[in-house]
Image: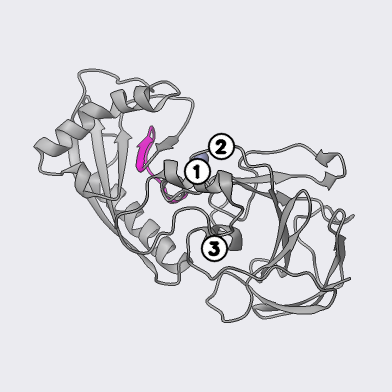
Amino acid sequence: MPRAPLLAVAVLLATLIVQSAGAVVKGDERVLVVLATSGPRPYTVADVEQTAAQAGNFFSAASFGQVQLRVDVTPWLAAFNGNPGCGGSTNRSLESVVAPARVAADQAGFDASRYDDVIYTIADSHCGFHGVTWGHEVMLTRQPNLQLVVHELGHAFGLGHAQASDCITAAGLCGLEETGDPFSPMGSGEVDFSAYEKVTLGWIRPQPHVTAAKRYVLATPTSASKLAQALIVDTAAGAWWIEFRSRPFRGLLFRFVDNSVVPSPFAQSAVLIRKLTKAKRPWLEQGESYRIPGSFRVTLTKATGGRAEVRLR
Ligand SMILES: [Zn+2]
């Protein structure tokens, strides 16, 4: 499926604060996995195909059937004469590492340009990172597993990291952990994408911006629903995304999206607040309240099944 280049997305983000800014990803997503080596074959094609099938199931469920991965895995290809190294920090240096793998794939009958995303897995590199994504190309330096493939494809789809901070005060965030959100594969988890990420990808509708102090009904974003799947509270500093999760706990999550957009090829990150109450857990349970700095006091008044009642005061 053709998409606007990520650079264009970044420009859009810099000029507009639109929740749906980012890459809308729907329909068939053709992914090529290139297994490139100078000799060693530390895992099998079947291993990688199994992981690709798991990732396909994950994206299908997370998108409510709107995205289907179509993955081809090459055989192991002798692309390098020795350890190709890790590349540098620029797109060009990464490109130079994977270029021989692309040529080898082409010679084996896999034309990388005919795919939406290409994942190069390098058998024998030992790098300080497990994966890196630029544009719609991914380089993995270890065996692909579900979390790694979903995370890097999330970047290829335009998502940034799911960050976390212990708290937020008038002075700002209490530290920032770049991939600290344990409930999103763009952080350290693989439970499901957040409502914010699903809106960014076009998998759920734009969500309501709430301005009135009253009761709201909220459905979890992990299942399809006609109800609101997040409440957005706008403040001078940024937007607060409140979502309800019913598994493995029942509670409200609070994520903050800063207004000051840093130019990046990826969508703006959301920051999960980890200590909402004295209980110091990253969700609000029934009966508990959290005051959004400079805005509403939010109470989870009722949580049953996949639905929550939330009161704003
Ligand atoms: Zn990442």
Name the amino acid, label 1: Ala
Q: Which residues are magenta?
A: 136-150
Image spot of residue 278 (x, y percent): 90, 55
**Residue position for label 1:** 10
Q: Quadrant of residue 216?
A: bottom right
Left or right of 253? Residue 289 is right
Q: Nearer the viewer, residue 143 or 255?
A: 255
- Where 241 falls versus 144 (above or below)? below
- Where 262 falls versus 220 (above or below)? above
| Mark in the foreground, 2 or 3 | 2
Decide if residue 222 is in sight here.
yes
Left or right of 140? Residue 34 is left
Q: Nearer the viewer, residue 280 or 109?
A: 109
Residue 199, which numbered label?
3
Name the amino acid, label 2: Pro
Q: Residue furthest front?
A: 15
